[in-house]
Structures are given as structure tokens and as C-alpha cells.
Amino acid sequence: MKRKVNIYLLSGIIICGFLILLILYSSIAVQTTMNEMQVNNRFAKPSMTNLLGTDNFGRDILVRIIAGLWRTLFVAVFTVLLGAMIGFSLGAIAGWYGKGVDVVIMKLIEIITAFPWLLLALIIIAVIGISDLNIIVVLTIVFIPSFTRISRSCLLKHKNLEYVSGARMAGASTLRIIFVHIFPNISTELLAAITIGFANAILSEATLSFLGLGIQPPDPSLGRMLYEAQSYLFKAPWMAIMPGLTIIMLVLAFNNISYGIMQWLNEQHESKEIF
Amino acid sequence: MKYIFTKLLMSVGVLIVISILVFATFQILPGDPVNVILGTNSTPERVEQLTKQLSLDKPLYERYLLLIQGIFRGDLGVSIKYQMPVSQILSSRLPVTITLAVMSLIFIVSISYLMGLIAGKNYDNIVGKCIVGICNFFTAVPSYFLCILMIIIFSLILKVFQTGSFIAYSDSPLGYFTYFILPAFSIAIPNSAMLIKFLSGSIYDQSKQEYIRTARSKGASEMRVLIHHNVKNALIPAVTMLGMIIADILCGSIVVEQIFNIPGIGRLLITSIGARDFPMLQILSMFIAAVVVIINFTVDIIFKLIDPRVRIE
């Protein structure tokens, strides 16, 4: 059988590689820092000295994009880690114990999802205020439901399989069965959920920062840069286009990696059925 | 009938819990609302008077009941920022957001129906793969970046659109609706991309089913097989996504109204957060969540009507 190339996975990794090249270039070739202002070099067009141009304070856009990129990734990593930890555990508990526990947890999840995610985020921000740490808290709460649903449905599929009853008969504790026996078997599904969650976390962080409710100036963030660029759209369109393209590439990379994992999962599934 | 009744009961339960949650959330907020309203010119008498007026001297559950009673009587409280009844502000802002949402929905449904049909029919060949690829790209594009791109294209390069100058319906109905085209489009594109992907996959899966072969062997034309048999069944799972899409439109409108200067609910929400206008925020949050719950309930009922096989799990 000819091996099919997993286009999604490949393209995701290529985009990631491109972003890494950009990061390397900016750390080697560019000397300015993210908040350094060059007053006589405002609104410079993209050129060799300022690869992506400069903004209204004469700050280098490439450097700011890379700094914003790190910050966005930082928020996304913590959001997804926390969200996945809490969500997967909740889902596992709901799926494993079933009945009343399941109903209570899933009703709670249903109520959280009755709020459109942005509204939920806005309400929580109104209560706990704006700070870098709070965005992680807000987005974690927003992302828990999707992780819970996935781990619950996986657990429901696996809990009556033979290897689980085998482990149970061997005297393994519930915690051991869930974390040592079941989780490795559903790790690909969970990994796909984590990567797509990661892409969504990046988008969400950018949206909140765009609305001025995320990372606070003068520190750069991709969403905030887009917001600031709005006032100079006619004078310096590159101020908006560059951060926007970066967000798209970042999200596209993780989306594609996630699709790639899912495609790989389906192929595995099909080949198992044939043999 | 039993299905509808059970779903109705569940939705009402969710609505009650939501109202309690939102109420409780805005009670634990730091800062006394009386001090927020009076600011520096507060005297003990005025504080006492306002406390009475806002019934802050009553216990929590009583205040909650008063709030719910008020909602049913149409008395939604007074906004701190605007010093006006919340219901009055809502009634002026609501039509704007509804127009935006309905236009987005029309765009979403028409674009994704048409493109989903083409992509589903050509799922295996290059046309379908291209459409799905383009959709994959657009699911990664945030709606606000689309807005900015559209402003650059349509008002900077083509000069056919004037941003920031919202036209009221009373001034010019035509201008009012044309102003919404770009915002609605930028909300519609990411959502359509998602829906097209889903719909085309669904159409492709259904086209492999036996009833399609039966229809073909009975001599039905290719068009009839597609529209009458294939798409009809493929649409059923897509209907369940409607609730999610409406929630997404509401999220999108919060952002898009901000960019295009549209005086709707989304803009109101953001200004209320900036002004710490909690009576307003409380009502707005309950209202939007309630809209989503009611739409999900309606979708469940429609789902049941078009596909009688559905049962409660």
C-alpha cells in the first residue's frame, strides 16, 4: 500500500517552521527592543532595516510581533494546560461514575456554555479585573467545557472494554485505571483536542486583547497591535496587516496539526478494521 | 409532546440557574454601587435614600426575587452610566444588533448551503478539496482582522464604503442596511467556513448511503437525487449547529460593532464594562444567555419536527 502523505500535519509543521525562522531572524538581525521608540522613524514602510515597518511611535513591528507572539503563546500554553487538566479530570469523573455525578457535571457544563464564550469572558473580567494572570483564569474557565466533553465521551467508549475490566479484576484502583490504563489509550484524541484548543486559545487571547481587555499596553500583544493600528489604517496599513497575518499563521499551524492528528487517527482506525 | 415538555422544563431550569448565577456574580463584586453612583458628593442622607431606592437594605434572596419580578414587569432597573432605564436603552440598541445578526445569518445560510452543495458533490476531486482547503484557511482568520482587511479594501482602495459613519434607520433605510453589509459579511465568513466543511462532509457521507442508490435506480435525475434526497438528510445534523452559530454571531457582533462603530448591544456591553455599569451588565448577560438558551430550545424542537427519530437520551 502506498503511504499517503498527511498534508495537514505537514503544512502545520511547515508554518511552525516559518514562524521559528522569523523568531530566529529577529533575535539575530534586529537590534532594537520591543518598546524602543525612534521618533524620526515613525510609520516607516517595510524595508531591509525594518523588515515589517514601524508603528506610530517608530517601534519596530517585527520585534513587537515576536514579543507579542511569545506572550500569546505563554497565555495559550497555560490556558490549555490548566483547562485540559481540569476539563479532562471532570470529564473522566463524569464518564466513569455516570448517573448523578454525570448529570450534575454535564448540567454545569451546559450552563457555562449557555453563555457565548466572549460574554462569559467579559463577565468574569468585569468581576476580577484586567491583568495578565486574569486572562489565563478567564480563558481556562471558557475552555473547560470542550475538554470535559471530549474526555467524557472517550471514557464512556472505553470504560466497558475488556482491558479495563481486566485491570479492575487485577485490583487496580479507579485512579490507576483512569490515568494509567485509559488515558494512554485515548491520548491521541486528547492530543487533538489540546492542539485545537491551543489554536482557539490563541484566537481568544487575541480577541480579548483587541477589545483592550487582555494584555495591557505598552507591552505588545498581537490583538492589541491590531487595535492600535485601526487609527492609522489609511496611513500605515502594514501596522494592521502584519500582526493579523501572524495570528492567522499561528492559528492555521495548530489547526492543521490538529486536523493532521485526527486524520492519522482515522487512518489507524480504518487499517485496524481491515486486518 | 412529551419530548417538547421535557425540553421546555430543562430549558426553564437552565434559565433559572443562569439568572441566579449572574445575580450572585454581580453581588460579590468589590465596591458599593451606592458609592459608585454618588461619587464624591455623597452625604449620609443621600446614601441612605439611595440604599432604600435600590433596595440594598433587603436580604439577598429578596433582592433576587425583586429583580426577577422587575424583569417580568418590564422594569429592568436604571443604568448607572446613562442614568436612564435599562429597558429604554435596550429597546434602542436591540434592533441594530438584531439587524446585524439576521443579515449575518442570511449570509451564512446562503453561502454555506451553496458552497456546501458544490463541495459535497465534488468531495473527491480538486474542486471540493480546494473549497475545503479555503474553508480551513478562513476558520483561522479572526473576524476583526477580516473587518480591517475589508475596510482597507473597500474604503481605502475602492473608496465605496465610509467607515465610522453609522446611518440611522430613520435617516435613510437604504443606507442603514447597506452599512451592515461589510460587518455582517465579516461575521459570516468564519462561520460559513466551518459550516461548509461540516455540510460537505455530511453530504458526502449521505451520498454513500443505500437510499441514494435506490433513488438513482428508480430513475430520479441527478439533481433530484442531490437536492431531494441527499441534501435533505445531510442538513439534519447541520441544524444542530445553528445554536452554536447564533452564539458565535453574538460574540462576533460584540467585536465587529466595536470596529464599525455600530451602536448595538455589543458596543453597549464593552462601554458598560469600562464604566462599571453593573445593573446594565447584569441585565445584558442574563438577556444574551437567555437568547442562546431559547434558540437552542427552538433548534431542538425543529430538529424533532424534521426528524421524528430523535429521542431524548
Image (tube, grey):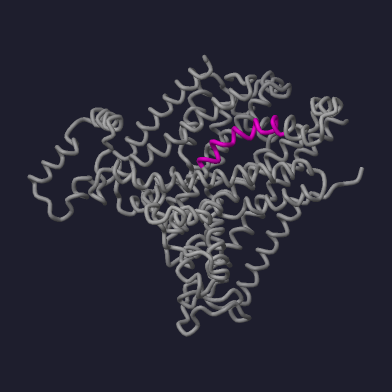
Q: Nearer the viewer, residue B301 or A67?
A: B301
- Residue B55 visible somewhere in the drawing: yes
Taking the spot 35% from the left edge, 45% from the top edge, the residue there is A127
**Residue B6, percent from left and from top:** 49, 18
Furthest toward the bottom, the residue is A40
In the rendered view, tell whether residue A117 sits above or below residue B73. Answer: below
Q: Specify start and end residues of the magenta stretch as a single range.
A: B231-247
The answer to if B112 sits in the magenta stretch is: no
Taking the spot 65% from the left edge, 32% from the top edge, the residue there is B237
Q: Quadrant of the C terminus of chain B?
A: top right
**Residue B218, percent from left and from top:** 85, 25
Taking the spot 17% from the left edge, 50% from the top edge, the residue there is B38
Question: Where, by quadrant of the figure, is residue B238 drawn?
Answer: top right
Q: Nearer the viewer, residue B47 or A73?
A: B47
**Residue A78, percent from left and from top:** 53, 49
Q: Would residue A76 appear left or right of A12 to someone viewing this image? A: left
Q: Would residue A51 appear left or right of B147 to someone viewing this image? A: right
The answer to if B239 sits in the magenta stretch is: yes
Q: Would residue A83 appear left or right of A128 to someone viewing this image? A: right
Majority secondary structure in the magenta region = helix
In the rendered view, tell whether residue A209 sits above or below residue B56. Answer: below
